[in-house]
Image (cartoon, rainbow, N blue to C red):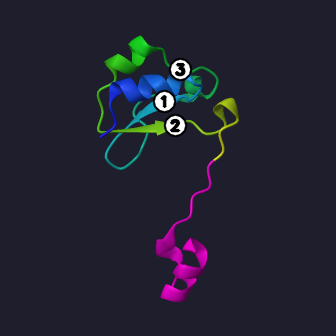
Amino acid sequence: MITKDYLKKLASIGYSIIPCDDEKVPIGKWKKYQTVNRTSDEIELLNCPKYGLVTGFNDLEVIDIDLKVLSTVSEKKRVVG
């Protein structure tokens, strides 16, 4: 489980944290956090099942590979290595 202390550390080194529901959908408005990250006090007030990081903030880029879209075991092995 991700702790508030860990989230605060991520925010302190430049990541923008957003609250998410169980389906990984952001809770509430988050456009503001594309340019500003949350303070420790704001993170402490978050109460949600999951958290996300705003990509593009502070040049964060993510590559997402969904193995479920690959049809064969050999394709999955080739992607994963």
- The magenta segment: 62-81
Q: Which residue is mark 2?
A: 53
* In this picture, residue 55 sits left or right of residue 40: right
Taking the spot 48% from the left edge, 14% from the top edge, the residue there is 39
Q: Quadrant of residue 64?
A: bottom right
Residue type at the position of mark 1: Ile
Cα separation, mark 1 vs mark 2, equals 5 Å
Name, please, the residue furthest toward the front.
81
Q: Which residue is mark 1?
A: 17
User: Does the magenta portion include 7?
Assistant: no
**Between 51 and 73, the one nearer to me in the picture:** 73
At label 2, counting other C-alpha atoms closer than 10 Å, the crowd grade (few under 14, some 14-19, many 20 or more) is: many
Q: Secondary structure at mark 3?
A: helix
In this rendering, which labeled residue sits more in front, label 1 or label 3? 3
The image's mark for residue 5 is none
Q: Quadrant of residue 32?
A: top right
Q: Secondary structure at mark 2?
A: strand
* In this picture, residue 2 sits left or right of residue 71: left
Residue type at the position of mark 2: Leu
Q: Give the mark nearer the N terminus: 3 vs 2.
A: 3
**Between 65 and 29, the one nearer to me in the picture:** 65
User: Does the magenta portion include 76?
Assistant: yes
Residue 1: x %, y % from top left: 29, 40
